[in-house]
Amino acid sequence: MVERFGRIEEARGSTPLTSTPVLTTRHLPWVFKLLVGMLAITPALTTACADHANESSFAGLEVDAPATMPNPTLTDTEGKPFAMRSDTQGSVRLVYFGFTSCPDICPVHLAQLSDVLDRPGMPPNVKVLFVTVDPERDTSEVIRTFLDRFNSDFVGLTGTVDQLLEVQQQFSALVAIPETVEDGDSPVIGHDGRVFAFAPDGLGRTQYPHPTRQTAWTRDLPILATLR
Amino acid sequence: MRFWCSTLEEPWSWTFRAYPGIWVAMLCLVVPYLVLDRKAPKVHDNRGSRRWVFIVAVLLLWVATDWPLGLLGASYLASAHMAQFLIYTMAVAPLLLLGVPEWMARRMSGQLRLYQLVGRCSRPVTAGLVFNAMLISTHSPWLVDNLRVNQFGSFVMDFLWLIGGLVVWMPIASPIPEHRMTSYPGRMVYLFLALGVVPAVPAGFLTFASFPLYATYELAPRVHGLGATTDQQLAGLVMKLGGIPVVWGTIAVLMYRWSEMSRAESAAARVQSTAAPETDNQHQSSTDADQ
């Protein structure tokens, strides 16, 4: 492109008559000030959207009266019985009710948790318990394959329709309502989008609705892990 | 039916999506250009190649704006957003300027009463500041998250990129000669400062930030399992490295042309200095003959 304009200027036989004022020493002080100003505001602008911690000790939704985690027994992806509280003693438990063909909320929550738990400084004693609300389609194999896309340490749980209904009620979750779908279509299931967080002391301290940013998780998980 | 790419809640899919607003915008660029170009004064050369340059620029603009890259950048991937920005500012903008002939630029700026405004914006200091202000603001998380959620906001962001790109290239490649910088070293310094220094700052923030800065891309359904932080680091690298070939390539060409010009000038000076004694000798000998 420069070559082309160079040729045009040469063809004209001279440089343009009215020349554009280039940088002069007169401009330099305020150019410098503006450049410094731009560089200075960049960090402010780029971090302006970051989640700032409020005065609460948690970035998530703090529960006013923490309740003890229920201890229902469901079936894990290896087909073995799994007691949700007693088999996770000493850990932070993040309980989530979802389904594997969920198009939006479930994959985002799990991907966020996977990213956060891979960060340095995160407590090692965090258990993610994914409880399906679609037991007909979500077999153990399907749940395992789905969870392995995010983290192979995530625990997948299933049970009968009645069991799962009861578990959702025990956790005070909004009970999932499967809609009937035509053959071949993915089911659309209205379900609770919150992740229920229980500290190692067994109390449900916080909840995390969709969407929750990684800054919130990263702030809260180390605090939760210390509550024994 | 949506008219412009903006944030979607659903997972990414390679199923084609139509955005008629983008097609209309492209036609609004190409059709008036071709209609005006048919009335081109015959004295102007390079008409065919200029036309092709303009059409390539519009094609690149279309690729950067429409599905799939446009939707990926508006909704799913910060790296795609950055690739769009680079295409807009490093390829589309200079090519559009090169594709517009001088007579057309003069006629359009005259009819739209934009000549003085364009002239002011073409000053290197102004152009560099306008571009970098646009760059920093349109990459701030607040603006990205608020503009990309709706179609009009997304359109505004794309429009700002295009205008910013045109402004920053104006001192180098404006179709109106008096709006271009004349000095080669000035152009090189300008390119380095305007397109090389300040953009490295937000690029560094994206690459080295501990957390995803943009909620839009952090909370979007993942595309092929690419994590939000990795995607953001990729975006920073794209921003940091993507412009290097264009900026430094242009600086290299300017350097070459500057050295060619200097060589030609010194050769001309040598010819003049050798011609002058000969003239003196000739004058001396003719005087002797007279004597």
Image: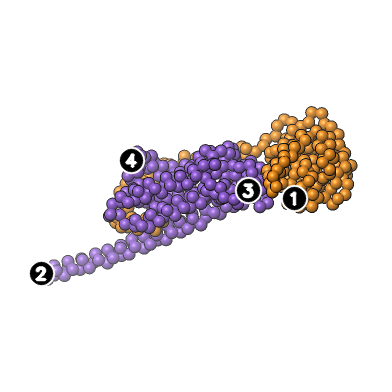
Q: Which mark is residue B111?
A: 4
Question: Which three-letter amino acid code belongs to the residue tagged 3?
Answer: Trp
Residue B122 x %, y %? 40, 44
Q: Is residue B209 visible?
A: no
Chain of residue at mark 3: B
- On the same chain, marks 4 and 2? The answer is yes
Q: Mark 1 points at which residue?
A: A146
Q: Name the residue under label 3.
A: B12
Question: Which chain is assigned purple?
Answer: B
Chain of residue at mark 1: A
Q: Quadrant of residue B140?
A: top right
Q: Distance between the residues labelled 4 and 2?
A: 69 Å
Query: In what quadrant of the picture does the C terminus of chain B appear?
Result: bottom left
Residue B196 x %, y %? 51, 50
Q: How far apart are marks 1 and 4 (CA)?
A: 61 Å
Earlier in the chain: of badge 4 and badge 2, it is 4
- On the same chain, marks 1 and 4? The answer is no
Nearer mark to the viewer, of 4 and 2: 4
Question: Which chain is assigned orange?
Answer: A
Question: Which three-letter amino acid code belongs to the residue tagged 1?
Answer: Phe
Earlier in the chain: of badge 3 and badge 4, it is 3
Could you tell me if the residues under marks 3 and 4 are in contact, i.e. CB atoms within 8 Å?
no
Chain of residue at mark 2: B
Residue B58 x %, y %? 45, 51
Nearer mark to the viewer, of 1 and 4: 1
Q: Which mark is residue B291?
A: 2
Residue A69 x %, y %? 85, 36
Q: Distance between the residues labelled 3 and 4?
A: 44 Å
Question: Foreground: B283 or B252?
Answer: B252
Q: Residue at x 52, y 45 (%)?
A: B19
Chain of residue at mark 4: B
